[in-house]
Image (tube, rainbow, N blue to C red):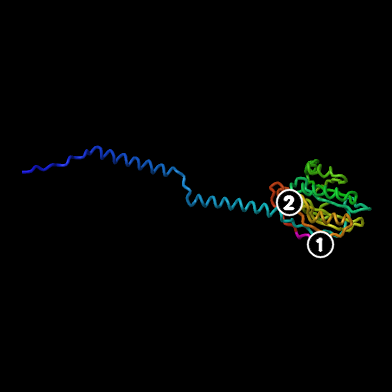
Amino acid sequence: MPMSIEPPERPRGNHTTGCAKAAVTLQAENQARAATPRFGTWTVLAFALWGLAVAAGSFYGFWYEITPAETDVALAGWPAGSACVLAADRPTLLMFVHPRCPCSRSSVSELAVLIARCQDRMDAQVLFYKAPASPEDWATTDLWHSAARIPGVVPRVDVAGAERRLFGASVSGEVFLFQPGGELSFHGGITAGRGHAGDNQGRSALESILLNRHSPSTTAPVYGCALESPTSLQQNTPPPVMRRRNHEL
């Protein structure tokens, strides 16, 4: 009779050890995958929201720079009771400034350009608002000294805003031009935006008036912070809304 040959038995110990190693390897791979950061839906959403926030902030900053402040309707003539001096032989220019307004550096810079182009054609006074109960030198900042260095410009302290209320000024950088008889011939700003120096409608109109040329405009937008709002000045936020916009004189 032919003899049957049994297949050799596989060593059971090696099989068990291999399975255990495979299980350990799989567990290690799963742990590595769990530890590896994944750019999932929430991560993409977070990046998208961050991008929108940056874009919104940039747009808001741009909008704020190019949006004029609202001012009161300008008075018709020189107010009684003012401590400022109205020149009898040439126009008088008044600029109201908050001494800590960053936007007003460009207004003072544009005033220097105006003075250089219209020498001896006006008296110019810059009134710096002084907060009530503030130290004596509170208004004499570097902005004050910049205005004082302009030839022919007289800086003055407006204690507690007494003069600004007489003239109806409400925004830092607001300008008034009066004729010798007291008639108001210009009211507005002399910058192209908040903190932006360069050619602008207000300065061009003043140059035309002072050089005895026809001026197409007697008012211009004012870009600046509120004269009596130190909180908005510190935070660089928009000034509170005033009552009415500039009106043609």
The alpha-carbon separation of the residues under discs 2 and 1 comes to 22 Å
**Dominant secondary structure of the residues highlighted in magenta in the image:** loop
Q: Amino acid at mark 2?
A: Arg
Residue drawn at x 84%, y 57% as measured from the top left: 186
Looking at the rendering, the stretch of residues picked out in magenta corresponds to 243-247
Q: Which mark is residue 248?
A: 1
* Residue sitting nearer the eye, 149 or 130: 149
The quadrant in which the C terminus is found is bottom right
- In the rendered view, tell whether residue 18 sits above or below residue 116: above
Q: Residues within 10 Å of mark 2 (few under 14, many from 20)?
A: many
Residue drawn at x 62%, y 53% as measured from the top left: 56
Helix, strand or loop at disc 1? loop
The quadrant in which the N terminus is found is top left
- Mark yes or no: residue 31 visible: yes
Residue 30: name its quadrant.
top left
- In the rendering, at what x and y percent does residue 216 appear? 83, 61
Q: Which mark is residue 185?
A: none
Residue with the mark numbered 2: 194
Q: Residues within 10 Å of mark 1 (few under 14, many from 20)?
A: few
* Residue sitting nearer the eye, 235 or 105: 105
- In the rendering, at what x and y percent does residue 155 appear? 84, 45
- In the rendering, at what x and y percent does residue 92 appear? 88, 52
* Residue sitting nearer the eye, 6 or 174: 6
